[in-house]
């Protein structure tokens, strides 16, 4: 269904975001890694739920990530335990400061499900380094498509970053959903630049 042209009211307690869907159908050339690498990427098979949710909340609070915080423990653990879901932690100075999650559950495809960095890890070439690893890992498998989506609530440079990394935009959507702060999945003080209009 097409949205009407012009403004549409978003009820209090809800958020609206413009989502851009991007894909890559052949492996893009990696951009040069930064010369100084002081972080480590480690695979986390069957990651503990508490660890995963803690890192997800830490990295995503600023962008109002909530999908994995709203899931039941059973449903989320089933996803994380799936052999076709690869979870990686990016560590700096012994502390986890990034998350990479690749989802191969659809044959011939990989979703770049989550790609997040803490404020400590940003603006040091870390995103480029992590994306290079993501491309290497995803295209190890016999896939025909790597895809990701980002939205207007994400980091303001996220869309441009994905485009520079070789993804091509193919679809745009508008998503309306419960504000995770209003329902208690994310702290009320999170994302102060996005006003909370409580119901």
Image: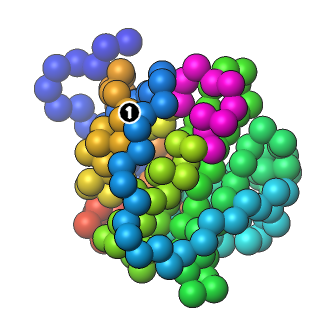
118 or 136, which is in the foreground?
136
Residue 183 placement (x, y as % from top left) = 54, 60
198 or 61, which is in the foreground?
61
Are there few (<14), some (14-19), or many (20+) residues within 10 Å of tag 1?
A: many
Q: Is residue 90 above or below residue 197?
A: below
Q: Residue at x 73, y 60 (%)?
A: 43
Assign the C terminus to one quadrant of the image.
bottom left
In terms of image quadrants, where is residue 198?
A: bottom left
Residue 92 placement (x, y as % from top left) = 55, 80
In terms of image quadrants, where is residue 119?
A: bottom left
**Residue carrying label 1:** 167
Q: For the magenta stretch, what is the residue range?
A: 137-146
Residue at the farthest bottom position: 93
Residue 145 placement (x, y as % from top left) = 54, 24
Helix, strand or loop status at disc 1: loop
Which secondary structure type mostly characterizes the magenta part of the structure? Answer: loop
């Amino acid at each position: 269904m097409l949205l009407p042209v012009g403004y549409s009211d978003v009820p209090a307690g809800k958020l609206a975001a413009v989502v851009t869907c991007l894909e890559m159908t052949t492996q893009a050339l990696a951009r040069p890694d930064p010369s100084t690498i002081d972080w480590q990427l480690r695979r986390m098979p069957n990651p503990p739920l508490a660890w995963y949710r803690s890192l997800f909340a830490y990295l995503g609070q600023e962008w109002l990530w909530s999908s994995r915080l709203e899931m039941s423990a059973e449903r989320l653990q089933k996803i994380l335990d799936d052999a076709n879901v690869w979870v990686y932690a990016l560590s700096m100075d012994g502390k986890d400061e990034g998350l990479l999650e690749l989802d191969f559950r659809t044959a011939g495809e990989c979703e770049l499900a989550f790609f997040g960095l803490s404020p400590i890890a940003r603006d040091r070439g870390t995103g480029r380094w992590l994306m290079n690893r993501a491309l290497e890992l995803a295209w190890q498998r016999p896939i025909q498509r790597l895809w990701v989506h980002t939205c207007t609530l994400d980091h303001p440079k996220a869309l441009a970053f994905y485009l520079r990394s070789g993804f091509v935009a193919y679809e745009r959507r508008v998503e309306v959903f419960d504000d995770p702060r209003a329902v208690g999945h994310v702290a009320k003080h999170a994302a102060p630049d996005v006003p909370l209009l409580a119901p």
